[in-house]
Image (tube, coloured by chain):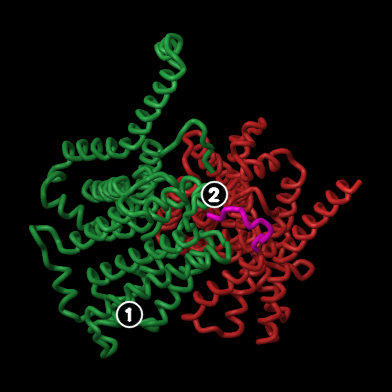
Chain colours: A red, B green
Amino acid sequence: MKKLSEFKLGNLKKINTESISKYMCLISVTLVVLIFFVINPKFLSLYSIQNMLLEMAPLLLLAGGITFVLFTGGIDLSAGAVASCTCVLTGLYIDNIGGWIVPLMIVLGVVIGLINGFLITAFKLPSFIVTLCATSIWKCIALISSGGGSKIIPLDKRYLVNWASAPLLGIPVMLWMTLAIIGLLYFIQRNTTVSKSILAVGANARAARMAGTNTVKAQITAMTICSVCSALAGVLYAFKMKSSVPNIGDPLGLMAIAAVALGGTSLAGGKGSVLNTIAGVATIIAVTSGMNIINVHALWKDIVIGVILIIAVFINSDKTGKDVIIK
Amino acid sequence: MKKNEIEYMKNHSVGAQFKYKIASDVKKEKIRIYAPLILLVCITIVASVTIDNFFSPKNIVNLFYQMSIPLVLATGVTFVLLIGSIDLSLEGVMGFSGALVALLVANTMNSVHLGWLGIVLTVILGTGAGVITGYLHVKLRIASFIISYAMGSIITGIGVLTYKGTPANVTWSVFDAIASESVFGVPLLTWISLSIFGLGCLILNYTAFGKAVYAIGNNEAAARSTGINVNKTKIMVFALCAFTASCAGILACVRLKIGQVSIGVNQLFPVITSVVLGGASLAGGKGGMLQTFIGVLMFTELNNILIIVGVDPNYRQLIQGIIIIVAVTLTITRSRKTITQ
C-alpha cells in the first residue's frame, strides 16, 4: 500500500510541473501585452488588435508547420524561402489562373516537402544542411521569377485577394483559415499514429526504430507538413500585401523557429504542442507591433527583440530535468 | 557479410575475429576521413583540365585570398560544431567588430585614434560577447540555437548603435598597408588568416582543452563523469568562436575600409556548410581542423569555378545549392546505425 501511495504522489508531482510549464507560455504573452498596455493604452485599441491578428496569420501558419519538424528533432531553415517563392508565384499568376493558384501552391509545397524528406532519409543527410541548400535554391527561384523586384497585383483583380483581409466577426478571414489549419494540425498531433511516430523519432530515434516505428515515413511526413504550411503562408503574404515580394521570407524562417521555441517546444525534439506555438507567435507579434506603438527607435529594435527573446525562452523552458543535455 | 569474411570467421579464434573486425572498422574510418580530400582532388583535377588558367599560380593565390575570411570564421565554427552546438551570433559579432574597429582607429566620423589598442579592444569586446552567449547557454539551459540567435540580434543592434546608421570610413594608413602588402607573393591578409587557423589547430590538437572538446561532442554525460568541467569548456568554445568572428570582422573592415554591420551578413551559413562539407558532424564529436580546411577550400573552389565558367549570377545560388547537396552526400560522416534528424 505504501508503495502505491508513493507512486501516486510521484505521478501527481510530475503532472503538476508539466501543467505549470504548459501554462508558462500564456503567462509570458500576457506579461508582454500588459507591459505594452501600461506604457501605451492604445496597444489594445480595436484597430491595433485587428492589425496584430492580420500580422499573426501567416507567421502562425509557418510556425505551426515548423513545430512538426522540431518534433522529429530536425530543423527546417527553408520555410521562409518557400514562403517567398509561393508569395512571388501567387502574385504573378493570380490574374491568369485565379483562385486555382492556391491548390497549385499546396501541390508545390507537397513536392518541396517530399524532396527535402527524401534527401534527408535516403542519403542520411542532416536536415540542417538539406534545408539550408533548399533555402538558396528556392530563394533564387523566387528572385529569378520575380525579376528581382516586387510586383503589385493589378487593381481589377483585387477582388480575388481582398476577401482574405476583410474581418469576419471581428477577426480577419485569413486568421480564421489559419486557425482552422492549426486545429487540423492539432487533430493530427493528437489523434494519428503518424504524429506519435514523429514524436517518437524526436525523443529517441534508435529506440523508435527498434520498436518498429517507420522512421522514414515519420520524417518525410513532418517535412511535408512543414513545406505545405510554408507554401500556404507565402500565399497568405501575397494576399495580405496584395503584391509579390521576393524577399519577404528572409527573416521569417528563423523568427518562426524562435516563436516555436518560445511556445516551449524543445529544439531537441520529442516534446511540445502545436497549441503552444500559438502563444509563442502571439508573443513575437505582440513584441514587434508593440515596439512600433510605443515608438521604440529603429536602432534599438534588434536589441529589445533579443533581450525579450532570451527572457521569454528562459521563462518557458522546461526546468524539470537538470540532467537533460542541452546542445 | 562478404563470403571471404565468413570464411575467415569460421577458421579463426574469437580473439582473431575481434582483431579482424577492429581492423576493418579502422579501414572504413580512414576511407570516411579521406572522402572529402578525394573529392577535393577530383574537383581540382577536372577543373584544371577543363578550365584554362585554373591551376595557374595567380588563380591559386586568388583562391587563398578569397578563402581568408571564411577560413578564420570556420576555425571557430569547427569548435562549436565539435561540441554539437551551433552559434548563430557569428554574423552579429563579425558585423559589430567591423563597425567598432572602424570607430576606434583613425576614421572619418570621430577623432578617436587608438591605433593597435583599438584592434585589441575590439577583439576583447567581441570575445566578451561570446563569453556571455556561452554563459547564458550553460546557466539558463537554453538551446544554443535560440540563445545565439537572440545574442546575434542584440549584438547586431549594438553594432548599428555605435555608428548610428551612417558607417565610418577608415583612414588609418596601417589598414591600407595590410590590405595591399604581400609577402612572398601572397597577400598579408591570407597569411593572417592562415596563422589564426594554425592557432586553432594547435589549440584543438595539442591542448587538454581540445581533447575535452572532442570528449564533450562524443558523449557529454561521460565527459562530465570523467571530471571534465563541461560548462567551462563550453563557455570557452563560444568565446573562441566569437574571437575568430571578431578577427574576421576586423579583416573584413581592413579589406573594405568601411565599418558597418552588414559585412557580417550572409557569412554564417556558407561557413557551416563548408565545415560540414569537410566531414564534420552537426551532432558533434566528428571533424577536425584539417577537414575544415579541406571543406572551406572545396567550397571556395566551387564558387571560383562557377565564377570563372561564367554562370549567370542570378542562377549561381541555385546551382551552388544543388552542388553542395551532391557534395555533402558524397562526403558526409554516416554509419549504418545513424538516423539523421
Tell me if mark 1 has few (under 14), some (14-19) or many (20+) residues whose alpha carbon lies within 10 angstroms of its own. some
Q: Amino acid at mark 1?
A: Pro
Q: Is residue B149 above or below residue A136?
A: below
Which residue is most to the bottom? B111
Residue A245: give x, y in percent of width and height: 49, 62
Q: Main secondary structure of the magenta part?
A: loop
The residues colored magenta run A317-327
Tell me if mark 2 has few (under 14), some (14-19) or many (20+) residues whose alpha carbon lies within 10 angstroms of its own. some
Q: Is residue B138 above or below residue A114?
A: below
Circles 1 and 2: CB distance less than 8 Å?
no
Q: Amino acid at mark 2?
A: Ala
Instruction: Name the residue rendered at 23%, 37% in the picture.
Output: B41
- Front residue of A44 and B249: B249
Helix, strand or loop at label 1? It is loop
Looking at the image, residue A129 sits to the left or right of residue A87; the answer is: left
Which residue is most to the right? A1
Q: Is residue A298 above or below residue A26?
A: below
Residue A201: give x, y in percent of width and height: 62, 41
Chain letter behind tag 2? B
The residue to which callout 2 is attached is B221
